[in-house]
Image (cartoon, rainbow, N blue to C red):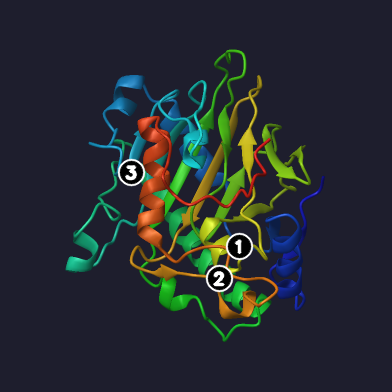
Amino acid sequence: MRVPVIDLHSADAARAVDEAGRSVGFMQVVNHGLQLKPLFQAIDTLFALPIAEKLALRPPHAGINRGYAPMGSEALAYSLGVDAPLPDLFEAFNLGPEQVPDDPWYRQNDFFAPNLWPAVPSVRSAMDAYFLDAVQLALRLTDLFAVALALPDRFFRPFVDRSTLTLRCNYYGGAAPKAGQLRMGAHTDYGIVTVLAADRVPGLQILHDGAWHDVMPDEGALLVNLGDLTALWTNDRWRSTLHRVLPGGSTRRSAALFFDGNYDARIEPLPTCVSPENPARYAPVLAGDHLLAKVLGPRTLSRSSAFDTTGGRLA
């Protein structure tokens, strides 16, 4: 299947976002303005480092969303509250904002932990520059979401003005999988919106109408998908789509900017998405509680306790 393409300069962009959210939960965006080549060069440099240097960048515990995750250390299926038979075949490197305000709100938990950089200045500068640009794009998208949902201008800004933010750079090498093993197990994304830069290499699949479909971005396009909190907000008007990455012989790189909302934001179905015929399907949640429950499952190889948006769509 072809994921809908949305031109961010188009006057019709909000309507196109609503259609994509209702039908697929994934979209491609063009005219986004982000520079991808320096990012992918930095990804190549980082993951080519000796394993000892990468392991030195592991975070001190599973609740810190920073630093290096070795191949086989996570299994994303656990985030859905189900068991994964085998760990996933990917390496990852997570980073967040470099500049965090000197404020107790940011220091009272690990959502804004310091980054764990390798001793390679070019990696740090390229990834941080891309991170800052991707965050601004995510903000633009939430403003577009407000228009698409007929909400007041910038409706979502109070929920995201101190958002937890993670750029996860993924590297899928040529490791031979065991029977049934995936590069990345089936999962939904946890937050509000994900901005994904990905190689045009086969592997990514999304679940649509009960079947798995291959997805590759058009040349120069970014993939954008909606997360669990947006599905909750819209009472499933928009989908948080199951996706996975299949094993394969080609190296594949991606970088996902997870825009997850303020950790103390209370998320509940929007009044405009609830009616007597379509009552609220979800109880309110705090964004940070949901994110932490989702993150810990795959990293501790245990079933997540977070709410589920799949509605029985697991294949």
> What quarter of the picture does the C terminus occupy?
top right
Q: Residues within 10 Å of mark 3 (few under 14, many from 20)?
A: many
Q: Residues within 10 Å of mark 2 (few under 14, many from 20)?
A: some
Residue 38 percent location from the top left of the image = 52, 46
Badge 2 or badge 1: first in the primary sequence:
1
In the rendered view, does 124 fall on the left or right side of 11?
left
Badge 2 or badge 3: first in the primary sequence:
3
Residue at the disc numbered 2:
142
Q: Residue at x 54, y 71 (%)?
A: 269
Residue 54 percent location from the top left of the image = 34, 28
Q: Is residue 239 above or below residue 37?
A: below
Residue at the disc numbered 3:
66
Residue farthest to the front, as pictured: 276
Q: Residue at x 49, y 67 (%)?
A: 136
Q: Is residue 149 above or below residue 54?
A: below
Front residue of this view, candidates 202 and 303: 303
In the rendered view, does 234 fall on the left or right side of 77?
right
Q: Nearer the viewer, mark 1 or mark 3?
A: 3
Front residue of this view, candidates 118 and 211: 211
Q: Amino acid at mark 1?
A: Gly
In the rendered view, does 204 fall on the left or right side of 16?
left
Q: Amino acid at mark 2?
A: Thr
Residue farthest to the bottom, as pictured: 152
Measure how far apart labels 2 and 3 are at the Cα level.
Answer: 24 Å
Helix, strand or loop at disc 1?
A: loop
Residue at the disc numbered 1:
33
